[in-house]
Amino acid sequence: MNVAEAIAEILRREGTEYLFCFPTTPIMDACAEIGIRPIVVRQERVAGNMADGYSRQTNGKRVGVVSVQQGAGAENSFSGITQAFTDSSAMLVIPGNWSIDYASLPPNFDTVKNFEHISKWADRITSKDGFLPRMRRAYTLLRNGRLRPVILELPLDVASQEISDFSYAPVVQYCSQADPSEVKKAVDMLIGAKHPLIWAGQGCLYAEASKELVELAELVGARVTTSLMGKSAIDESGPLAIGAASFSKNALVVKALAEADVIFAIGASLARDFTAAHIPTDDLDGNPKRFIHSNVEVSDVNLYFSSESVLIGDAKLVLRQMITYIREKGIQRSEQHVGALKESVAFQKRAWRDSFEELISSDDEPINFYRVIGDFMKTFDPDETIVSHEPGVTRDVLVPHYIATKPRSYLGWGHSTQLGFSLGACLGAKLAAPEKMVVNFMGEAAIGMVMGDLETAVREKIPIITIIYHNSLMNNYSRIIPKAAKLFKSDELSGNYAAVATALGAFAERIEKPAEIIPAFHRAIEAVKRGEPVLLDIICGNQPFISYGGEDLQSLRDIQQKGGYGS
């Protein structure tokens, strides 16, 4: 047995089913020989995106593994690994290198040096004696704490070194609870608040804490919003769920953030980038908002907001501690209080939804994208569907309007907004959950980045549905680059994406009339059942009405008339 074969065996013991790769890699043959299926992509970036989506869909229980060749392969994989790093997703990346003696010498690409800032740990396996502790440490980091990529470079001459038999037991996840005194402090703050708000992040999904999240919200009488990546951590049709606090958002989120006097962030970084909703400094009484912050590690705490109570631990265990304390002390909110809050949330949801009904049922041609989303929600069972977006209109319409009902039924992403990510992520998610219908919404700029990997979906028989928002524009960019758009049409795009998809072997249709949308969705579902990847190229108009500030439709029209947003 050589080092490459030993690493493949460790991957198998750790539950690896797939190797996302582009030939040649130092471990590809060794993995194939023991039943780990190579998924060969058309570009290395997408291998990373697939591993990322696979890991997210399994909540890190099964870690996506990427292997690429030395030099160009590692270089091309950089952006896919960056996306996983910024969004806190685990993946093991095993790139090659020519030889241990020359790995760090020019002109060779030094993966360890170049990837150390986009990984939880980057190292090189330097000899047959060094692979075992590094693999053990890699999986310890991949299963514990904040999940992020780990890089282990494997030079070709080290991969071929012969070893004797070895002993390796799979690494387990270690979960901890919070300090009991902080639990008491946090509960007292929530129970004493006028308008408590829970902000749930992706950590609640990783901890599989959705049940506990709902239970705590009921006990303390708190509305629940989520981060973009935490979307689906709570059933958004539930009575206290108000939607995601993202770049675009509904009126309920804006109202709750304005009213909140105590905000409890659980499994969330509270990072202040443009994908997160603005949190006002003061509550309605003019007092500074107070924060409780719970995370799996301390790195994000007291970064953007000062927290009065800090609970470091696994989200599920921390929530259970709080629930137990409340029930033992008998200090939960009254049923009348919680009932009134639920009625208020239900009323606001209806008002918000009804205000957009005109667009959701629009018969306009070109097709209104809201009509696409409305018909999608009429056709697909949200309990059995996984949905993802791209930066821009697909995200900004989907996030506040699509109702996610099950954990990981929505793959929200975007601390880094790399166009094209959703295709690979959804291919990985489909491999992780083959029983689900997996659908990604893309604009033209996004599909242009990765369209070659539709062929990967065809060849590897990974049937997902890709829906293209096709309006021949980079939506609303004319107000960002007005001179370039006017003089050189720099915001315009072109292409017949259905024709390209057909040429690549996918089932594809071009849809131009609103009445064609639902029948096309049904044909797409049947194609997926036959094992065929699908691309639906839907010809849409420009979409000026996006609720960046929680506006209803009439308010958006008023803003447009005054020259704002999509004017």
Image: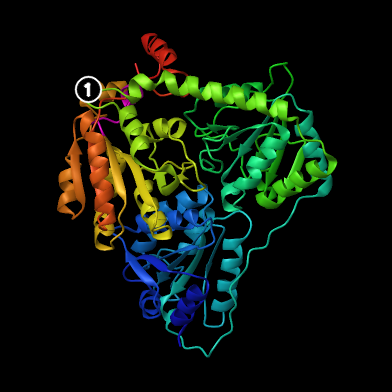
| Dot 1: element | helix
Q: Tell me where residue 366 sits by quadrant.
A: top left
Residue 356 in sight here: yes
Q: Tell me where residue 45 sits by quadrant.
A: bottom left
Give the vertical position of 351 relative to 377 (above or below).
above
**For the point 74% across and 20% down, which residue is it?**
287
Read off the magenta span: 470-481
Using residue 422 as the reference point, say whether residue 412 is left or right of it. right
Using residue 459 as the reference point, say whether residue 323 is left or right of it. right
Give the vertical position of 550 relative to 269 (above or below).
above
Quadrant containing the C terminus is top left
- Identify the residue under disc 1: 487
**For the point 27% across and 29% down, which residue is it?**
491
Give the vertical position of 524 relative to 241 (above or below).
below
Residue 500, given in percent of the width and then of the height, sits at 17, 47
Badge 1 local density, few (<14 within 10 Å), some, or many (20+)?
Answer: few
Q: Nearer the viewer, residue 227 or 4?
A: 227
Residue 237, given in percent of the width and then of the height, sits at 52, 35
Residue 288, given in percent of the width and then of the height, sits at 73, 23
Q: Tell me where residue 563 sits by quadrant.
A: top left
Give the vertical position of 329 relative to 262 (above or below).
below
**For the point 37% across and 74% down, which residue is it?**
28
Using residue 23 as the reference point, say whether residue 403 is left or right of it. right
**Which amino acid, mark 1?**
Leu
Q: How many marks?
A: 1
Residue 313, given in percent of the width and then of the height, sits at 71, 52
Q: Is residue 478 magenta?
A: yes
Task: Give the dominant element type of the magenta stretch: helix, strand or loop.
Answer: loop
Residue 549 in sight here: no
